[in-house]
Amino acid sequence: MKPVPVVEHQVKVPFTDPTACVQLVRGISGFLSELPPGRRIVLVCVGTDRCTGDSLGPLVGTTLLKYRSPHFDLFGTLERPVHAINLYETLSVIQETVRNPYVIGIDACLGLASSVGSIEVGEGPVRPGAGVNKELPPVGDMHVTGVVNVGGFLQHAVLQNTRLHLVMGMADLIARSLYRSVTMWQRSQAAEGPAIGGPGGAPRVVALPAARRKSLEAGRIQSQPI
């Protein structure tokens, strides 16, 4: 018996590469194509608008809003970021409110100088806070990350001094790639059976319940996310 070939979906590409969107869509679509029917796509865009380098996730989330797609649930925008303070609570809300979720974690990261500006699609969760030595829960069944600056030295200062132009360019590319990939996957699901998306016309942007938001806002005074 011949061994079953392993399909490698992991992608790492500079955001300035003219074929970057095509490569990212191919990688994301590869992971989605392996999902059984009935999974609901959940995009968790981790980060904060209080720090330029760490704003990649919320920028991706905000950019995704303009597509008004009903095919995914969205956590993490500039208005309602998902960060160190509310991450545990957000993951609990996903488990409580989303049936059979398939979570894609989106976050910024630090890396080698030669990798700055690169976007990576890979299997398994993103690990928020790892670049600045924070212990936070992993996020996602798969991940999309962007290397926004050089790691290894004065990480907080490096994140604060990251160029906004770089982060915005990467965020736009990631958002376009995610939208195209999820839309293509949803259409293939619809061709095989009933659609599993939410109400037509817009993504379901999920916010924490008011009581939870109030308690988290109080905690923000004492603890600032990166």
Image (spheres, grey):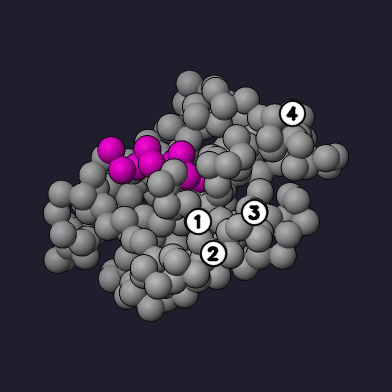
Q: Is 221 on the left-hand or right-hand side of 99?
A: right
Q: Is tag 2's residue or tag 4's residue first in the polypeptide sequence? A: 4
Amino acid type indicated by mark 3: Gln
Residue position marked by numbered label 2 in the rendering: 218
Dominant SS of magenta comes to: helix
The residue mark sitting in front, 3 or 2, is 2
The x and y percentages for residue 17 are: 53, 23
Residue placed most toward the observer, 146 or 74 = 74
- C-alpha distance separating marks 3 and 4: 30 Å
Q: Work out whether 39 lies above or below 17.
A: below
- Which residue is labeled 3 in the image? 224
The magenta stretch spans which residues?
57-66
- Mark 3 or mark 2: whose residue is earlier in sequence: 2
| Numbered disc in front, either 2 or 4 | 2
Return the residue at label 1.
82
SS under mark 1: loop
Viewport quadrant of the N terminus: bottom right
What's the CA distance linking mark 1 and mark 4?
28 Å
Element carrying mark 4: helix
In screen coordinates, is 126 left or right of 25? right
State left or right for residue 114 relative to residue 214.
right
Task: Tell me the crowding category of disc 2: few under 14, some 14 to 19, or many 20 or more residues within 10 angstroms, Cα based.
Answer: few
